[in-house]
Image (cartoon, rainbow, N blue to C red):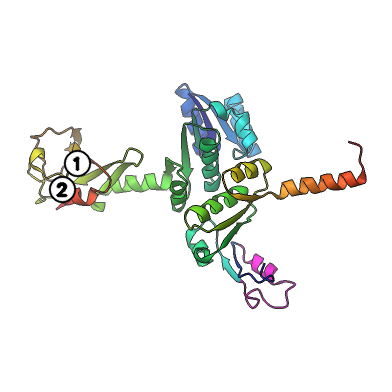
Amino acid sequence: MYAIVVGGGKVGLNLARELLNKGSEVTLIEQRRDRYTAIEAELEYVAQYGDGTELWVLERAGIQRADLLVAVTGDDEDNLLVCQIAREKYLVDRIIARVNNPRNKQYFDLLGIQPSVSATDLILRLIEHEVPQYGTVHLLDLPGEKLEIIEMEVVPGAPAAGSAVQDIAMPEGTLVISVLREGGGFVPKADTVIEPGDEVLVCLDPGLEDEVTPLFTG
Amino acid sequence: MLSSGHEVSVLDEDPLSHERLDSGMPTTWEDAGGRFTIGQAIERDALVEAGIEQADVFIASTDGDNTNLTIAQIARGMFEVPNILVRVMDPARAEWYEAQGLQTICPTRYAISMFEERLARIGAPS
């Protein structure tokens, strides 16, 4: 696989290292001269100097044959533009954009730049995962596949508490895919009884969250 | 634009730009009918405060090509402003985004052709 990483800050450099370790061919584009020099000393020809939003810089990096482009500069407009140009002008199959300010995520969505990754969002999700009083946790959204996975803690007295999976009135388009109990996880069978305190992962079609949640959280 | 009778609202992150608008004018920018909002063009709230929802024309002319191209596409996609003009210094990006349906203005290209014109007038050997 040939990957182009735009932005050689901490995220970009470590990402490039990981991709190289996994056997990918990588070019890392950095526009600050001092950073470029440091990267070049370590990664040699992998580093290229230039503004990754300029077409000739992308072409010099061989964007026409890239399988993946990751834009991880500290500037959201730059990341957005690089990804847009990569996908729409150079027809790169896979793009990933970093969102620095979560409020800009709406613009990435608006222009169809997906997936976009925001560190703030990821940390927020971890907090929600660690602090269960937040209730339902959105683990994963796959808008392209039209699927969501949510996590809930089963509340005593909820309809699902004490019921076998097959007896829970799950709406069409939802499925209990995993149960976390006493530090371990397993895939439930139809006759598995859900206990209060269990954490369940439910896979669902988008929009069904409000129907499913009360079954487990009362 | 204000003096040719249009209603103009300026959005800029630097309050100094407001003073610059006032300088050399007989009245203040507001007294002349202009509007001024301090804020970043990438902020949705700032755009709304500046009146983007009522705008017939949106002009993106910050000093950053990528900011201009981004906010122009926000104006088009999110606020459906009917006319959008974008300043893009880099001729290559200006050309490609023009082909994608954005009306781009590339000062670099104009400067080059003006230089060429003057050079031709000087009669420099080619």
The amino acid at mark 1 is Val
The amino acid type, in three-letter code, at marker 2 is: Phe
Q: Name the mark on residue A183.
A: none
Query: The residue marked by circle 2 belongs to what chain?
Result: A
Percent position of residue A59, x then y:
61, 31
Q: Which residues are magenta?
A: B14-34
Task: List the residue tagged with mark 2.
Answer: A216
In the image, residue B9 above or below residue A134: below
Q: Is residue B18 magenta?
A: yes
Residue A76 part of the magenta segment: no
Disc 2 and disc 1 in contact, CB within 8 angstroms: yes
Identified at 56% across, 31% down, the residue is A28
- What's the mark number on residue A200? 1
Query: Can the viewer see residue B60 in this picture?
Result: yes
Among numbered discs 2 and 1, the one appearing first in the sequence: 1
Query: Does residue B38 lie above or below A52 as drawn?
Result: below
Q: As drawn, is A106 to the left or to the right of A65?
A: left
Task: In this rendered view, identify the residue nearer to me: A181 or B19.
Answer: B19
Element marked by disc 1: strand
In the image, what residue occupies the spot 48% across and 62% down?
B45
Magenta: main secondary structure: loop
Q: Residues within 10 Å of mark 1 (few under 14, many from 20)?
A: many
Residue A113, x across and y down, in percent: 46, 42
Q: What residue lies at 54% left-to-right and 26% top-to-bottom?
A: A65
**B122 vs A74, nearest the viewer:** B122
The answer to whether marks 2 and 1 sit on the same chain is: yes
Q: Position of residue B18 (x, y in %)?
A: 64, 68
